[in-house]
């Protein structure tokens, strides 16, 4: 079972969604440049009303070569593998530190315990060990809005659609992209790097019995590239393609504008059944309102390992294993998915979720560090569960807005980093379990510089000196620093003249006690050196809207990692200010240039150098005060086995959740 | 208490309010509640002297300072205590930078806004950050390193202030609007009554949530103002009713006949007679405002951080139910305060209602 992994290009913005401000689950929100650009002015919307649906109207005009011309092209083979097998191979070289049974008996109190548990529980199933009739009760903090894979944007939707959709490509825990052996016969790239040709297997079927063909892929591409279809996330990346053409039922060619290192990611987008949508899409380009589409959303035609059995809004989503996924003509053609049913229980409040875990009603959930530290140490928890953690490349930061009058000067930003008590943050607020962040890439990432820059340590004197150098001084003797600076009250990038102002700013954060506490620590530190910092907790949607408009001075937030370093382009380049998620308006021509180079450099070693340079330049500029990498903390029921962590947590990679199983012996 | 003396001279009959007070004093529960509120007010006023890390008074480099006033307003802390790397940390810096200095310290050396760190005060250890149970140094435990008792002492200020200020605003608006509406009647009354109905439709909590998101630097004062501007309708209606009734009475006619202006009649003559029924909703209004503030803070939309409102402590406790002290102590404080105000309101209601008056009085 190779569960499709896609949308790898999207970075995710981690924050909370609940009003109560104590949700444990971090919503993975994927706002992308292309979708934002789609809904700019009201003028556009008016015309949209009258606009006719044109399938694929965003696709640039281009004449694809004939089949003969393709035959004359020089092709090189790309790897088509079974990622499950890759994991099996990896596990063969690892010796489990103890058996699962032994791991169940111990408690996770030290890093050594954790290593043992991670290693023991990561062991893959041996013959006859899997209980194929099992049900897996998973936790999700929010309901899904749609079952259509084109419409995904939240982490819950990623999780559900990951189990339900057919995927031609995948990537492993090192983020190496592969063709998915479960769906492809071959994958080739042309010598000039402008085309990717895949041959699909002919034993792929939708859950309604129709065949999954290359025409479905072509159609899906056209739908994604239709301006009247409101695609929230997956258009980004896909819009970098020049075209996609199906030559016959099995042969599919992707065309690129340029031979880029990121092309392998751009060809990875979700697939919907053409036969279900082609006749109805013109009447309802939203894919969500017409009766036919509502019906399809309720009972979607699945191309993946599972299909929807039942869905109770706000409560649960039950997925059922699909026999036609792994059986074809009475032959087993793919690995049998390990669970009979997968049930996503929607529980918003993390305390309630944890109580369900303790009762054995939930079998998996992500823990907050606080829950890890104090609420999962008792017999109640260990009766049914165990827990483990692993490094995840999700970093948290204080972001400084370059359009704010305070943070234009590099010395001020560095002073902020010196003023903050990093040690207390890591030891107290993060329980000494999370690692300090030394920039955009984690030190174990191939894109990080060989010697990571050294972390900032609190040094108030140095901060005071840097601020004085930058001209901040308490000239009116009121205890608050002041300086003559350029003002930009609207945060639109245009100066409104300069004036002497007090150093008093507001930092935004999402409304969660642990995050507010971290901002309060900054507030306390800055107060000591004569800077007034106000902490303003806001709701997640407000936070996002404010950041998008650049109307803030500082913010506390976090970023997850994409599979390719090029995804960071969306955060740091000048063009991403208006058209991406460069919320802090950082602009550095050198960085812009490096990202362009990084995209075009195909040699891995040279490409690595480019991103290392980006990492170091950003660290020097301190557009963020980088704080820490948040580990993935998970609780699992004792009956679950075979989970392994990647830098994106236990699920969002290949093979991810498809190796997880329930042991027949436990039942 | 009110036994008539044996003397034969005619006793001056007590006025209405004196009468009410005498009746109120006889209600034990209400009196306890009143004492409780007075006690809380004292705690609120003297909070920086009860718990804090800034001296109440100190002599530093030959001058007297009152750094603890910073807890009322950050601008009241002399900049001398921030400059020259003094950085607002008193105990060691005072002696180090001026050996001649002396200081009078608050009863409890704990800060409502931040954890006390290691060796900040002599060789006292740092506050425990996680799982800081009630102990000798932190009597009510800690909440993310901050002393819960210190937070609650300073939180009293917020709770009482919210109650008084927002109800004060509401009462002022309510009484004036209700008086005008009731006294003038006619189309003025019709318009004002419709406005009252309109304002009643505004859900104040939603309005607060929206405004707190819009305002660049929201403070507790914004919240009090919104609460005040949305909760005056009940008082306005009561005042209007009283005025409708009283404006027909003889003393008003008498006043008018000797040429008193409408505002003189309204506020000098009618209002004192109409106050009794209005006082009761004012007292209940205080309790309601405290409850709303605690509720908003519990949801995380109340007093902006790091204000140590009781609801904020509850909010911190909510994410970690094993740390019961963050729930129990502020919970009790909220309960007692609201109960006290409600008891006072009830006592007042009974004391000012002539129908409930003891005929012997």
Image (tube, coloured by chain):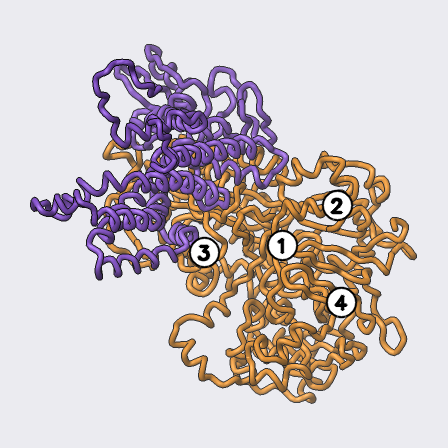
Chain colours: A orange, B purple
Q: Whole-percent x and y of residue A577?
A: 43, 61
* Structural crowding at the residue carrying mark 2, measured as other residues with C-alpha within 10 Å and reported as few (<14), some (14–19) or many (≥20): some
For marks 2 and 3, give the CA distance.
Answer: 36 Å
Q: Which residue is mark 4?
A: A306
Between discs 2 and 1, the one toward the N terminus: 1
* Structural crowding at the residue carrying mark 3, measured as other residues with C-alpha within 10 Å and reported as few (<14), some (14–19) or many (≥20): some
Can residue A391 be seen by looking at this rendering?
A: no
Tell me which chain the residue with mark 1 is part of: A
Q: Is residue B71 above or below residue B305?
A: above
B129 sits left or right of B290 in the view: right
Residue, x 81% and y 50% (percent of image)?
A: A641
Q: Whole-percent x and y of residue A141?
A: 62, 54
Tell me the number on the disc at residue A359: 2
Between discs 2 and 3, the one toward the N terminus: 2
- Kindly state the secondary structure of the residue where label 2 is placed: helix
Outermost left residue: B259
Q: Nearer the viewer, mark 4 or mark 1?
A: 1
Tell me which chain the residue with mark 3 is part of: A
- Kindly state the secondary structure of the residue where label 4 is placed: strand
Residue, x 61% and y 84% (percent of image)?
A: A280
For marks 4 and 1, give the CA distance.
Answer: 21 Å
A395 sits left or right of A310 in the view: left
For marks 3 and 1, give the CA distance.
Answer: 19 Å
Tell me the number on the disc at residue A141: 1
Between discs 3 and 1, the one toward the N terminus: 1
Both on one chain, marks 2 and 1?
yes
């Amino acid at each position: 079972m190779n569960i499709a992994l896609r949308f790898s290009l999207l970075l995710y913005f981690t924050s909370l969604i609940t009003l109560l401000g104590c949700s444990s689950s971090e919503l993975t929100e994927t706002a992308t440049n292309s979708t934002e650009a789609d809904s700019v002015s009201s003028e556009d919307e008016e015309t949209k009303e009258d606009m006719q649906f044109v399938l694929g109207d965003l696709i640039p005009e281009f004449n694809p070569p004939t089949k003969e011309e393709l035959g004359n092209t020089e092709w090189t083979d790309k790897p088509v593998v079974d990622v499950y097998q890759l994991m099996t191979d990896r596990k063969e070289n690892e010796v489990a530190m103890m058996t699962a049974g032994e791991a169940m008996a111990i408690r996770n109190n030290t890093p050594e315990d954790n290593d043992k548990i991670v290693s023991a529980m990561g062991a893959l199933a041996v013959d006859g060990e899997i209980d194929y009739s099992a049900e897996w009760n998973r936790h999700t903090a929010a309901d899904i809005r749609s079952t259509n894979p084109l419409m995904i944007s939240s982490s819950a939707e990623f999780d559900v659609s990951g189990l339900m959709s057919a995927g031609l490509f995948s990537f492993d825990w090192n983020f190496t992209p592969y063709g998915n052996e479960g769906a492809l016969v071959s994958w080739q790239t042309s010598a000039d790097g402008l085309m990717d040709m895949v041959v699909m297997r002919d034993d792929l079927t939708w859950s309604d019995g129709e065949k999954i063909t290359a025409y479905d892929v072509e159609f899906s591409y056209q739908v994604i590239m239709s301006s009247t279809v409101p695609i929230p996330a997956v258009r980004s990346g896909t819009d970098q393609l020049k075209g996609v053409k199906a030559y016959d039922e099995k042969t599919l060619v992707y065309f690129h504008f340029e031979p880029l290192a990121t092309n392998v990611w751009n060809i990875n987008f979700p697939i919907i059944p053409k036969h279900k949508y082609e006749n109805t899409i013109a009447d309802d380009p939203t894919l969500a309102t017409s009766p036919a589409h509502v019906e399809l959303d309720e009972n979607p035609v699945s191309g993946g390992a599972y299909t929807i059995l039942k869905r109770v809004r706000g409560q649960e989503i039950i997925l059922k294993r699909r026999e036609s996924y792994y059986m074809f003509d009475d032959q087993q053609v793919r690995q049998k998915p390990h669970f009979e049913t997968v049930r996503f229980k929607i529980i918003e409040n993390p305390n309630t979720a944890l109580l369900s875990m303790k009762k054995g009603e939930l079998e998996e959930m992500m823990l907050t560090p606080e829950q890890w530290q104090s609420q999962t140490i008792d017999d109640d928890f260990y009766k049914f569960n165990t827990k483990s953690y692993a490094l995840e490349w999700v970093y948290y930061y204080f972001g400084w807005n370059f359009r704010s009058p305070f943070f234009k000067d590099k010395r001020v930003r560095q002073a902020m980093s010196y003023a903050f008590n990093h040690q207390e943050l890591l030891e107290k607020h993060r329980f000494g379990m999370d690692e300090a962040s030394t920039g955009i890439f984690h030190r174990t990432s191939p894109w990080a510089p060989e010697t990571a820059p050294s972390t900032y340590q609190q040094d108030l004197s140095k901060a005071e000196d840097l601020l004085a150098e930058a001209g901040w001084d308490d000239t009116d003797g009121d205890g608050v620093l002041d300086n003559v600076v350029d003002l930009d009250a609207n945060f639109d990038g245009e100066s409104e003249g300069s004036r002497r102002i007090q150093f008093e700013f507001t930092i935004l954060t999402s409304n969660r006690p642990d995050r507010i506490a971290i901002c309060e620590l900054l507030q306390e530190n800055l107060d000591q050196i004569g800077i007034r910092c106000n902490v303003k907790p806001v709701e997640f949607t407000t936070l996002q809207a404010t950041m998008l408009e650049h109307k803030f001075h500082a913010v506390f937030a976090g970023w997850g990692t994409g599979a390719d370093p090029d995804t960071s382009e969306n955060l740091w380049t000048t063009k991403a200010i208006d058209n991406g998620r460069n919320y802090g308006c950082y602009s550095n021509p050198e960085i812009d240039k490096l990202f362009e180079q990084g995209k075009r450099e195909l040699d891995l070693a040279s490409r690595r150098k480019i991103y290392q340079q980006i990492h170091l330049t950003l660290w020097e500029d301190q557009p963020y005060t980088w704080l820490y990498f948040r580990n993935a903390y998970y609780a699992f029921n004792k009956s679950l086995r075979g989970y392994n962590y990647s830098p994106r947590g236990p699920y969002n990679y290949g093979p991810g959740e498809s190796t997880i199983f329930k042991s027949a012996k436990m039942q | 208490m009110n036994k008539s003396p044996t003397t034969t001279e005619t006793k001056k009959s007590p006025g209405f309010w004196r009468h009410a007070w005498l009746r109120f004093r006889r209600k034990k529960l209400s009196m306890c509640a009143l004492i409780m509120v007075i006690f809380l007010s004292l705690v609120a006023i003297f909070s920086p002297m009860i718990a804090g890390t800034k001296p109440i008074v100190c002599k530093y480099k030959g001058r007297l300072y009152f750094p603890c006033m910073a807890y009322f307003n950050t601008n009241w802390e002399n900049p001398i205590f921030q400059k020259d790397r003094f950085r607002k940390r008193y105990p060691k810096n005072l002696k180090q930078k001026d050996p001649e200095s002396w200081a009078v310290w608050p009863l409890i050396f704990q800060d409502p806004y931040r954890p006390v760190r290691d060796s900040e005060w002599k060789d006292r250890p740092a506050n425990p950050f996680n799982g800081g149970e009630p102990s000798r140094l932190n009597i009510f435990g800690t909440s993310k390193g901050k002393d819960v008792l210190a937070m609650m002492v300073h939180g009293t200020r917020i709770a009482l202030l919210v109650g008084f200020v927002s109800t004060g605003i509401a009462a002022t608006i309510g009484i004036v609007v209700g008086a005008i509406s009731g006294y003038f009647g006619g189309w003025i009354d019709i318009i004002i009554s419709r406005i009252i109905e309109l304002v009643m439709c505004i859900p104040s909590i939603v309005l607060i949530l929206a405004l707190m998101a819009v305002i660049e630097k929201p403070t507790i004062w914004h919240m009090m103002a919104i609460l005040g501007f949305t909760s005056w309708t009940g008082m306005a209606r009561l005042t209007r009713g009283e005025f409708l009734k009283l404006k027909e009475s003889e003393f008003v006619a008498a006043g008018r006949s000797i040429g008193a202006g409408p505002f003189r009649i309204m506020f000098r003559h009618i209002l004192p007679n109409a106050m009794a029924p209005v006082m009761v909703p004012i007292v209940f209004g205080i309790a309601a405002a405290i409850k709303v503030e605690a509720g908003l803070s519990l949801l995380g939309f109340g007093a902006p951080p790091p204000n140590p409102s009781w609801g904020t402590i509850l909010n911190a406790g909510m994410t970690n139910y094993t740390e019961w002290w963050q729930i129990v102590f502020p919970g009790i404080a909220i309960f007692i305060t609201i109960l006290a105000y409600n008891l006072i309101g009830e006592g007042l209601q009974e004391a000012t209602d002539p129908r409930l008056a003891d005929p012997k009085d």
